[in-house]
Image (cartoon, grey):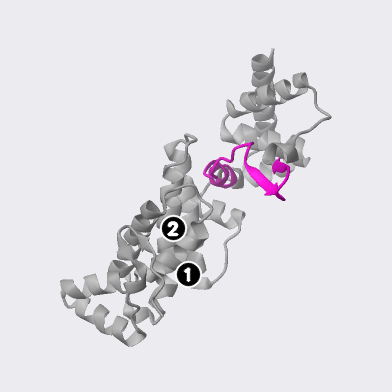
Amino acid sequence: MAKHKVEISGINTADLKVLSSEEMKELFIKMQQGDAFARNDLVSGNLKLVLSILRRFRGNDENMDDLFQVGCVGLVKAIDNFDLSHEVKFSTYAVPMIVGEIKRYLRDNNSVRVSRSTKDLAYKALRLKEENMLINGTELSVEEIADTLEVTPYDIIHAMEALRAPVSMFEPIYSDGGDTIYLYDQIEDKRQTGKEIELRLATQEALSSLDSREQFILDERFMIGKTQMEIAEELSISQAQVSRLEKNAIKQLKKILK
């Protein structure tokens, strides 16, 4: 029976070699001794690992050839930084790096503009999560990441949410061969009038003009229902400062929404 042939980036995937654990170890030793050909063999011998990871991104609109090449960049980084003394499988080390490289590419090519500082914070948070998962096998909480990076939990959540890929309201989410259900069918709120929607959008825009700490205080006070004292303890400032920041934020919102 002939092998199933699939071509990606001009490579026939059916012809790709898969290295054994012993072959991998020998090639890494040779590479660390300065053998450039061993490095090339390690790359070509792990291309199927990149292909297996690409299955996770099949629903994405990006060109799969492009994602494959980006994944190969992550593979090369993993090969160059892998340490045999850690006694872990290469795939265990490489998969998070390849996935991370592809995700960073997708975020950087997002059609929604996100500030560099927000992106940097999100990347730092993701790197912490990946490293902790690799070393300890557990996932850090938002609070733990915020403490390590010396920012508020709100900053972490805001940064991570800002990097989510936008979805069209006209994205089809179900079809049984007849009528198609689109995303906007699921999020439409018939209880709201046009004026109410306009007011809500204006309020969201006004809130975005506040700094992150003022937004955090308003969210905690009026969305979650915390007291000023609770927020003061969370931010390590006085209740008087929380009160002043809250009043200033509300004053700005009123000015913008007039």
Q: Which residue is mark 2?
A: 100
Name the image quarter holding residue 72. Answer: bottom left
List the single residue furthest toward the front. Answer: 1
Considering only vertical position in the picture, is 62 above or below 12? above
Q: Which residue is mark 1?
A: 134
**What mark, if any, has residue 245 been given in the picture?**
none
Image quadrant containing the C terminus = top right
Query: 253 or 190: which is nearer to us?
Result: 190
Apparent side of residue 7 relative to residue 151 in the rendered image (left or right)? left
Name the image quarter holding residue 52. Answer: bottom left
Q: Which contiguous range is marked in magenta?
A: 156-181
Name the image quarter holding residue 43. Answer: bottom left
What is the secondary structure assignment of the residue under circle 2?
A: helix
| Dot 2 alpha-carbon crowd within 10 angstroms: few under 14, some 14 to 19, many 20 or more | some
Query: 151 or 233: which is nearer to us?
Result: 151
Q: Amino acid at mark 2?
A: Gly
What is the secondary structure assignment of the residue under circle 1?
A: helix
The verdict on residue 169 being magenta is yes
Residue 170, x across and y down, in percent: 63, 37
Residue 221, x across and y down, in percent: 74, 36
Residue depicted at 36% across the width and 68% down the height: 13
Q: Amino acid at mark 1?
A: Leu
Give the mark nearest the N terminus, 2 or 1: 2
Q: Say if mark 2 contacts mark 1, CB within 8 Å.
A: no
The verdict on residue 116 being magenta is no
